[in-house]
Image: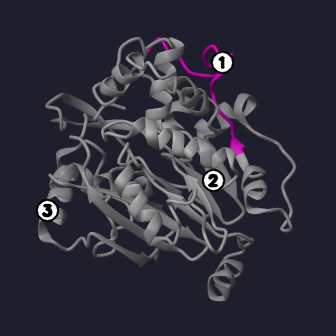
Amino acid sequence: MDSVAHGQEDSGLIPTPHAFDIIGDVHGELPALQQLGRNLGYDVDAGWTHPDNRLLVFLGDLVDRGAHSLEVGELVRDLVAQRRAVCIMGNHEYNLVAYHLGVEGYGKPKHSNRATIAAINADTTGRWPAVLAFFRDLPIGIDLPDLRIIHACWHRQSVKDVAPQLRVTLPRAGVGADAMAWVEAHVTLRSPFTTTGLLSGLPGDTEDMDADVPHEVLIKGFEVPAKPFRDNDGKERDRVREVWWQTGTSDTYLMEKPQVFGHYWNVPPVEGDFAPPHPSGHPDLRDWGLKLVASGKIATSGQAAMTGEFACVDFNGVTRASKHLACVGALRWPEREMWWATAGKTAASGGNDD
């Protein structure tokens, strides 16, 4: 721990005074999430307690594709209420809330959340409304002194565009604050929703669904033109999510400190890969993931040092490439360790829609 803190001080960043486990996209795969928790030392059968009182930080995309969207949503909601976890908004939470609030452009279910919406509409237990309300209020980004946390990307212009409506200016918690209060005090961008729809005044022409709406860019990624190709669902596409950690610059993205994110269908660290080399949904990414899964190089669980400044812990690449296994990953901070665990896949993967 001392060596990590020393390295952060050398970089000019203030080292984090608390220990977190930052968990990537779960997508309803509860068994894989539970296995990851056990590997990280949590007692998942006793309220996800940890002997070292570590804090969980979830990167969103808790739902869709796996069989346990409701259960995962309830688990994370309860952990947040019990002050054992913090969660930010992923595009799948955003899409569900936008659909149920009737946001323009979200009037129909997407391929990836159609089953979840059907389950919500068929709910006779009354459990889903509280989960949707929890999703509605999730913040978008957390900016710690030595780490940025977001679902997709810190696109500089988009952050500037939404700042008047979404920027949080709470007093920063001191080193003496508990981990939960300290992280909450570093929430930088709040939810774009009210109880009835999107916040008034948010920039972006939502009538033009081909336009890049700033707050959606932060949650879903920035799209750029591409040579036409067929995605995983056979749909013809001519735009892809930018592989910003390779092609971005400090003029277009906030890149002054380490960042952890999900969203991009990565696999656990193999041969130095800490963020996927191709855009999500593109055949090159699909082939890359299939090759690595088939090679047997990816262990069913493990850990590896984070060597770069970017960590994508969405290990849904394994889930989508494997017939039988689901994978959930985490970044342990400030230790800079990437962790992952697998369990039996609980449902067939859904589509590639945002």
- Which dot, 2 or 1, sits closer to the camera? 2
Q: Secondary structure at mark 1?
A: loop
Q: Nearer the viewer, residue 252 or 146?
A: 146
Which residue corresponds to mark 1?
A: 195
Q: Secondary structure at mark 3?
A: helix
Which residue corresponds to mark 3?
A: 291
- Which dot, 1 or 3, sits closer to the camera? 1
- Which dot, 3 or 2, sits closer to the camera? 2
The stretch in magenta equals: 188-208
Q: Which mark is residue 85?
A: 2
The answer to whether residue 224 is visible is yes
Q: Nearer the viewer, residue 236 or 36?
A: 36
* Chain-order first, disc 3 or disc 2: 2
**Relative vertical location of residue 41 with respect to residue 185 in this rendering, above or below:** below
The type of residue carrying mark 2 is Ala
The type of residue carrying mark 3 is Lys
